[in-house]
Amino acid sequence: MRRVRTRDIAALACAASLLTLSACGDDESGTSDPTSSATASTSTTSDDEHAMEQVRAIDKQLRAADPSKPLPEDATWATDGFRTRFDAAAADFTEAGAVFTGKITTESLHLGESDPDAPGGGQLTAYACTVDTTRIIVDGKDVTAHPNDPTKVLPKKPRHDTYLNTYSTTDDGTTWQLDRSRNLPDKDKKGTPCDA
């Protein structure tokens, strides 16, 4: 039986965070704040309603994706950048011999901010309110690391998370793609639609 070292657990936690849609590592696009644009708006328009329809469809496809395999070639709902990060994390996870159990269930999705004049095309953010029961198993042992201390195993109970997802369009809002996602820390959840 292989011994799982603390640094291995941290690496698995990092990979798992991408597979469960949270920012990880030094990827600049995964840690930036997409809501900082001065031209962003929180008003809802018919274009935003169309975008949110696509956001809901993208979320369903994402939840159906196998976290231990690369995204399918026909997963046009993901940008190249998101696909690259997801596939790399899945490869690391599989190479480590880890098994991914449980699931993430999206309870609701809420429009954050919309910026039709963002560089490279329109951009919007949406909050995903989720319940997470995922665990990381290696050699039959639960090594799901606590996000604040990778030397400790996360307690076995459903976790209510808030993700701030960023979507982009290059065709004036006809189609949207998931570009990046960030699992908000507790201090940033306050005041979000998921903070009920």
Image (cartoon, rainbow, N blue to C red):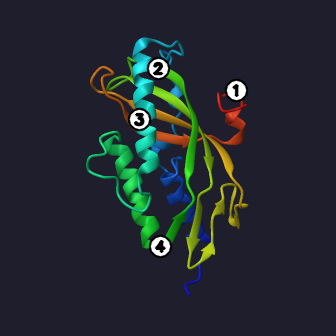
The amino acid on which the numbered mark 2 sits, given as a three-letter code, is Ser
Q: In this view, does 166 lie to the left or right of 131?
A: left
Q: Mark 4 points at which residue?
A: 96
Residue 115 visible (yes or no): no
The residues tagged by marks 4 and 1 sit, at their Cα atoms, a distance apart of 38 Å
Q: Is residue 137 above or below residue 49?
A: below
Q: Nearer the viewer, mark 3 or mark 4?
A: 3
Which of disc 4 and disc 3 is earlier in sequence?
3
Q: Nearer the viewer, mark 2 or mark 3?
A: 3
Q: Name the residue under label 2.
A: 114
The residues tagged by marks 3 and 4 sit, at their Cα atoms, a distance apart of 31 Å
The residues tagged by marks 2 and 3 sit, at their Cα atoms, a distance apart of 18 Å
Q: Residues within 10 Å of mark 1 (few under 14, many from 20)?
A: few
- Marker disc for residue 191: 1
Q: How crowded is mark 2: few (under 14 residues within 10 Å), some or many (20 or more)?
A: many
The residues tagged by marks 2 and 4 sit, at their Cα atoms, a distance apart of 39 Å
